[in-house]
Image (tube, helix red, strand yellow):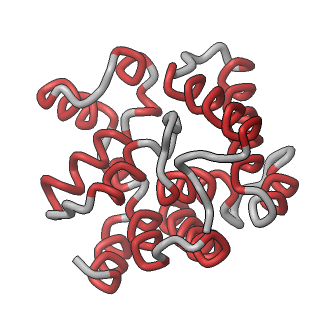
Amino acid sequence: MDIYEIKEKIEKEFTGKLLSHSKGVEDMARRLSAAYGADEEKAALAALLHDYGKIYPTHDLMQVAVENNIVDEFSLQEPALLHAPVGSWLLEHELGIYDLEILNAVKTHTTGSAGMPLLSCIIYLADFIEPGRSFPGVVEIRELSFRDLHKALLGAVDSTIRYVMERHGILHPSSILFRNWLISLLRKKSGSCSVK
């Protein structure tokens, strides 16, 4: 599927807020890609499709997850996390999208993951800072995102961890590993999520 077919598909499948959010993530992903030398079209596709799993009810996501053994115990206990890994699986099996960079970016956009490549970092951050988001700290992270990708990602994951902890939610281990990886990168000033 090309970008035009994807846009046509999401216009039909996504509801108002989800559609608006996905377009906001696309806009931000394009801007971040331009700033950091990533493939802009690939980032746009991943951004538009990052919440594809949300068009399905939670019980359907749970069923797909269990039947295909594609999630861990933490995601099963925290259903809000299901849409990312299950959505990635659905993109491959329903829409025929086989680009691993796109699939991994969709899969990790809620929890993050240590060693994420640039496209995954961009989608994670674009989802967090898209123009429709308004919560304490988002403006600062949005501004930082064009100066220092890793610091902005650390601000985003720290904010997410605080949010989950304040609500006594289950914190996915991938988020902690992602945070630790970012801290290590910032200390070394190098890493897999390197910028051109």
For the point 40% across and 24% down, the residue is 75
Residue 45 % position (x, y): 39, 71
Instruction: Indicate left or right for 96 with 109 as reference.
Output: left
Q: Residue 10's image quarter?
A: bottom left
Residue 67 % position (x, y): 12, 27
For the point 71% across and 28% down, the residue is 163
For the point 29% across and 74% down, the residue is 9
Quadrant in the picture for the C terminus: bottom right
In the image, residue 167 above or below residue 150: above
- Front residue of 158/135: it is 158
- Front residue of 51/34: it is 34
Residue sticking out furthest to the bottom? 4
Instruction: Indicate left or right for 195 with 49 as reference.
Output: right
In the image, residue 166 above or below residue 131: above
- Front residue of 83/109: it is 109
Residue 20 % position (x, y): 55, 69
Quadrant in the picture for the N terminus: bottom left
